Amino acid sequence: MGDRWIVNRSGSVVAEFLARELRNSIGGEVLRPHDAQYDAARKVWNGMIDKYPSLIVYCRDRADVITAVNFARANDVLAAIRSGGHNVAGNAVCDSGMVIDLSLMKGVRVLENSRAAEVQAGLVLGELDAATRSFGLAVPLGIVSRTGVAGLTLGGGIGWLMRKYGLTCDNLLSADIITAGGRKLRASADENPDLFWSVRGGGGNFGIATSFTFSLHPVDHVTGGMVLYPLDKAGKVLRFYRDFIESAPDELTTMAALMKAPPLFLIRGLQEEPMIAVHVCHCGSPREGELVLRPLRTFCTPLHHMIRVMPHYEHQSMLDAGAPPGLLNYWKSAYVTSLDDTLIDMIVDNFHRAPSPLTQIHLQHMRGAVSAVEEHETAFSNRNALCVMNIVSKWVDPRESERNIIWTRAFAEAIRPFSSGSYVNFMADEGREGTGSAYSTTHYHRLAALKKKYDPDNFFSLNQNIKPAP
Ligand SMILES: Cc1cc2nc3c(=O)[nH]c(=O)nc-3n(C[C@H](O)[C@H](O)[C@H](O)COP(=O)(O)OP(=O)(O)OC[C@H]3O[C@@H](n4cnc5c(N)ncnc54)[C@H](O)[C@@H]3O)c2cc1C
């Protein structure tokens, strides 16, 4: 149960009448621990996170965000920012402080002629796809439709269209940001370009994004789905995968996934057995898609293949069932620059020892349009990585937490020599040292200098934090 008092960062109680004033000046809603909806409202996607904020402020518009920021700053109250609530680290909630929740801000406007979309920060990916699909247009987004657009974009945005059209942040034309001082700034190539640079990969360190404008691309149908092989062929499949992605056209984005117990939706009619899947999305012509993907069915006999031409919108939620909210999750990620035999053997060997049958390893192929953007153009680092590897540890029983966390950390440590860094959006509890691993040294120093400029007191501290430069 949350504390009925609002306690600031120095441990003093904030006067109740100030909280009442806040409640009266917010157009959205303010929840306190005694409110009926509080318990559901404090939860995020990752069941490991169990925090009790003193205030949850549901903002309806930008004015509410400014009011909430000003309240937190004036009263020295710790503030967490939440949009989709999908971040594994759980920084979108906090104990004692205030959650500034943008999930009611769901406005979206498609500007068909200029091939752009104006999007408020509370949208989740599926809602944005739903708004653009009838125009046959899409923003490159992530692979699970309930993820928040805001957090995904600010950290980069890896997904099925990235090799053709870039990361989500590469498609950002502008963002409206509320600073720690409660000021509204536009970040774009023309306005505050340094802020624009930092919000394309630097996460939520620089202010609260209330809206984004994205470029849209003509994507209506894709050739997508997956091919499944038995896990005992994992070494062979990953070696084949290495060669297959080497010659993949930019229209094709793929992900190899090792799974102990594939989610039930995958295995209707199949035995539940450990598998390795190659997930695919080809956004070119169906005929080219069929030709390019054929070797996946012929290099060895798969258990099953489920590749077909389908609406892009449908493909975007194909993996949703495998990512239900409430499970206990602990993730680590690593960019890898090559998939040599030693690394492949290490991945397969470690995966066999994963304590939980729900755990998966994902290898998402990057390059293409991701590496066509120069490294210095955005805060996002590691554009030349071949793949981003994600150790997706998940389990049900809290008594198993320690075992799973120890295994995940040990595995991440073992592959560190093969890695050039971590993806900031997949980080768990890496803390200060870990945040540095998401960026090149040059980028990290620039981010710290911009943090000093835009948030010198580190008001936005609940994130993969970049400390202001001294
Ligand atoms: C099942 C699942 C699938 C995923 N798939 C992908 C994927 O395909 N590709 C990918 O790139 N990532 C993926 N992710 C990671 C995801 O991008 C990050 O977790 C991201 O932070 C989620 O955004 P959110 O708005 O839901 O975050 P929240 O949990 O709401 O917030 C996380 C953090 O983001 C910052 N933040 C959120 N909103 C704002 C805002 N409006 N202004 C400023 N800062 C803000 C804050 O620092 C906050 O602590 C996935 C995560 C999950 C759990």
Image (cartoon, rainbow, N blue to C red):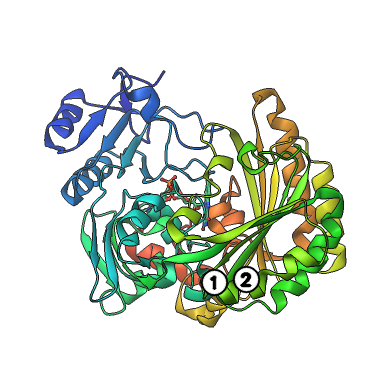
Left or right, 161 with respect to 457, comes to right
Give the percent coordinates (x, y) of residue 63. Answer: 16, 49
Residue 54's spot in the image, x, y percent?
34, 27
Distance of mark 1 from mark 2, alpha carbons?
A: 6 Å
Depth check: give the residue in front, 159 or 223.
Answer: 223
Residue corresponding to mark 2? 290
Left or right: 174, with 152 as reference point:
left
Picture quarter with the C terminus: bottom left
Amino acid type for the residue under numbered disc 1: Pro
At horizontal 16% and vertical 27% (from top left) the residue drawn is: 20
Residue at 41% across, 57% down:
205
In this view of the protein, which residue sits in the foreground, 4 or 162?
Answer: 162
The picture places residue 58, in percent across and down from the top left corner, at 26, 37
The image shows residue 300 at horizontal and vertical percentages of 83, 62
- Give the residue number, with chain letter if any, for mark 1: 286
Residue 416 sits in which quadrant? Answer: bottom right
Quadrant holding the N terminus: top left
